[in-house]
Image (cartoon, rainbow, N blue to C red):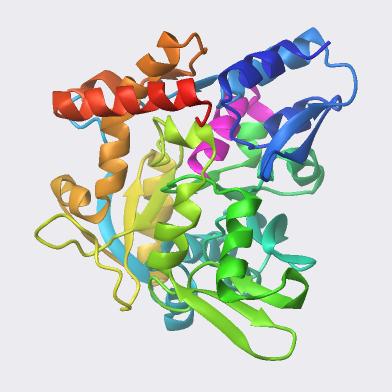
Amino acid sequence: MDADFLKRVRRADSCTGCGLCAAVSPGIRITAAGPGWARPEQIGPVSAAEDQAIAAACPGLVVDQRDNPHDPAEPLWGPQRFTGVGHASDPLLRHTASSGGVISALLVHALASGLVDFVVQVRADPDQPTGNITSISTSPDDVLTAAGSRYARSSPLAGLNDWLARPGRFAFVGKPCDVAALRARAKADPALAARVPLMLAFFCAGIPSDRAVGRILDHLKVAPGDVAAFRFRGDGWPGFARASLRDGSSRQMTYNDSWGQILSKEVQFRCKICADAVGAAADVACADAWYGDDRGYPSFEETDGRSLVMARTAAGLAVLDAARAAGTLATQPVPVADIIRMQPHQARRKRQVLSRLFAMRLVGRPVPRYLGLAVAQAARREPIMAQVKSFAGLVRRFIKGTA
């Protein structure tokens, strides 16, 4: 029989692919499913204790932010001890990273200061350049090599036991759902919490399938076997999706075309009902600090990278302050009200989450439990007709079988 958590996640189609379940139980492994999502597969017994531990931390079932809740008066952007914009002081790191390189700069500082002994982060798979692997970084060069967004499936928590088997403390970088799962697991395991003094997240717009990534190569008229290296972004801001070929040539397309026209059209279902795409459980969360126009649309013209930076915990604020004092990065505060111009799509997503959860309930699907995330307060900021459209659109897709 399937583990109970697995049955519940499958009924809701709410798996994020984080991989935590595979770390908790040897009876679970992560594999590719459907058009290319990371999904758990039961390969052996799952004990009742393992099942309970997984269910308590699985972001497909629960995201619990009650220990550090959203301010109900500011429900969109999560806990904040510092909000600003900034960039890595190292020009190469700033240019290579996807925006201003602040996450990478924080990792460099954490390693140099001895806060951590290594970093767990995702980078390109050398054997499949459009895919991802989770790896260890122990030097600034390692961090630089891994810099840049990777818009493909990843399950960084599947290897949690491997990281814990290494000596020393580590920083973790992941999607908001990855960090939420790790934070929940750490709350239940003080020994784990002591090993991970720094958790970093980036704002996430959703995880595209392998099939969607393949469509980029099709658009570029590139065979997968000809690709020697692949970047989704970076080497500028926002940078280009670029396939470097084995013959030494390269082909590229703009971020607006690669993400806006291809990848964003095929993200997994759980991402469409995400109440924490801004990394509320992280110590520090970063995003693109887009320059928005008067109509509220971000500009994707190439320019020097700029990160939105949000320290969410005392630990996050401490490492941010220390990195600034060391000259590793530069920041300046901005009013919270400015974020909506930088990240309008995240604002709309959060405001519409409740309507989509109601649509799931209407058709009999179980819904994830979102606690301390101010979902109802965010919904009150969305016009009623927009809520109705969001609700009806998802119900229609359920009926058609396209959701």
> Vertical placement of 40 versus 196: above or below?
above
> Vertical placement of 378 versus 240: above or below?
above
Residue shown at the point (65%, 48%) measured from the top left:
154
Q: Is residue 348 magenta?
A: no
Which x, y percent locates residue 300? 30, 69
Viewer-nearest residue: 144 or 242: 242
Which x, y percent locates residue 319? 43, 53
> Vertical placement of 186 versus 125: above or below?
above
Q: Quadrant of residue 359?
A: top left
Horizontally, is 202 left or right of 335 in the view?
A: right
| Residue 6 shows in the view | yes
Q: Quadrant of residue 225?
A: bottom right
| Residue 78 shows in the view | no
What range of the chain is rendered magenta? 175-191
In the rendered image, the residue lying farthest to the left is: 294
The chief SS type of the magenta part is helix
Residue shown at the point (34%, 28%) measured from the top left:
393
Viewer-nearest residue: 157 or 191: 157
Residue shown at the point (74%, 30%) measured from the top left:
40
Horizontally, is 79 left or right of 291 in the view?
A: right
Horizontally, is 380 left or right of 86 in the view?
A: left
In the rendered image, the residue lying farthest to the bottom is: 248
Residue shown at the point (60%, 23%) measured from the top left:
57
Viewer-nearest residue: 84 or 202: 202
Viewer-nearest residue: 242 or 284: 242
In the rendered image, the residue lying farthest to the front is: 400
Which x, y percent locates residue 341? 18, 53
